[in-house]
Image (tube, rainbow, N blue to C red):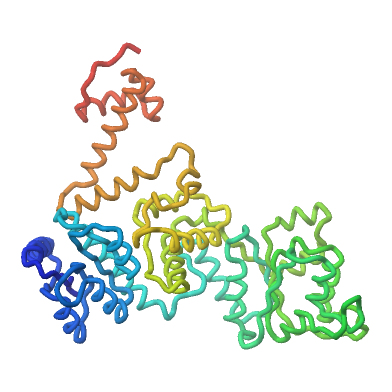
Amino acid sequence: MKPVWVVDDDRSIRWVFEKALSREGIPFRTFAQASEALAELEASAPQVLVSDIRMPGTSGLELLEKVKERHPRMPVIIMTAYSDLESAVAAFQGGAFEYLTKPFDVDQAVDLVRRALEESLREDQAEETQAGEPEILGQAQSMQEVFRAIGRLSQSSATVLITGESGSGKELVARALHRHSPRASRPFIAINTAAMPRDLLESELFGHERGAFTGAQAMRRGHFEQAEGGTLFLDEIGDMPPELQTRLLRVLSEGTFFRVGGHQSIRANVRVIAATHQDLDARVKQGLFRQDLYHRLNVIRLRLPSLRERREDIPLLARHFLAKSARELGTETKRLSDAALACLAAQDFPGNVRQLENLLHWLTVMAPTQVIEVGDLPMDVRQEQPGLDADWLLALARQVERMLARGEANIMDVLEREFEKTLINKALAHTGGRRIEAATLLGIGRNTITRKIAELGIEGRETQE
């Protein structure tokens, strides 16, 4: 790990940081002027930069700007004794990681440096792997199965049916299947069969001859011809009109088709990958989807899990989408606090990965600081689970950070004891001291609550049951 640089013309501030960082075992260097730090930046760079905002000569904001030009991902903490809105806005617009107002609590400052170090080390890891970062992300076992299937199909041209809820990434899987196939150098054409009227869809798929219908002033090649030698992805195939199902079946079974209004058979050398969020078995039974077409499409089936089935992937996906949004917007990458991440991981996300991506893009634009807290999340996200107030997670995360920074031991035991004590005290207060009722509300037995009251030293007279 590279050292933390502290830049401040105030000797006492530098001394405080020197003592605090030495105590925590964090390597550091201090500079009295921004110009000194900039000169040293030619030869080396810190892991994190902490700088005063108002100094003789080069200001902290100027230093921030020049550092970000050379090292855009480096966390920079800006300090100032002038807690005015203009300075705060300028610091964050310049890409500051956080804003520290003097006089500050030393433990608070060290906590902030530690968070910045963690962020910087994560960014270093991300940069190392970014070049080879896959288009589809997932560490969950269900996603690993999908990746293995893509690998097994890498040399195949077999028809594939991808099933999964809307927003789960079906087109990404289709693109991956194409990219790793022998057809990778040829076109990949995607069309949503539920997004257009039947007549237009027919022309889009198969093309049309001049004069085939009103407005057809010239011959047009359809997607089957455009995808020649490559892959045609038919999304939401379950909503395809019955007449077009018949035409698609002929292409899959005979390998030929006619343009609309045409009489000449055209051979199709195209791999078809279809996708749907519908239950095709049910639609076949209802007479809404041709059984013979279903069997033609269902040669190899891949099921994509919903996001709620792989919640362990939410942190990975969140970091990826925050970085992606920052690149698109040309801004510093934001990050989620532990409490905010826990709140997101508790959501069901009916819109799946697409919904998560849209949410994180919104947060990149709207969250006021580089660290996204629970309070920055949209109200509907915070309140999606009735009765769950995620603010306590934020408070818990901050308490854990403070205890870790102070080097305290047995943190789990201490917090677990306080957690249980608070739960039982509040339940007893709610029931007027009635232990059986309190135990029922907490979901524990009477013997358990009696034992806990004794172990935790909870005072108070037991009310008659």
Asked if residue 106 lies left or right of residue 386, the reply is left
> Could you tell me how many numbered marks the image carries?
0
Q: Position of residue 126 (x, y in %)?
A: 36, 73
Image quadrant containing the N terminus: bottom left
Q: Position of residue 80 (x, y in %)?
A: 20, 62
As displayed, is residue 98 above or below residue 397?
A: below
Asked if residue 268 lies left or right of residue 341, the reply is right
Residue at image location 58% in from the left, 81% down from the top = 179
Residue at image location 37% in from the left, 70% down from the top = 332
| Quadrant housing residue 184 | bottom right
Image quadrant containing the C terminus: top left
Which residue lies most toward the top here?
A: 464
Q: Nearer the viewer, residue 403 or 230?
A: 403
Residue at image location 79% in from the left, 56% down from the top = 284
Which residue lies most toward the bottom here?
A: 185
Q: Is residue 386 visible?
A: yes
As displayed, is residue 260 above or below residue 111?
A: below
Q: Position of residue 88 (x, y in %)?
A: 29, 61
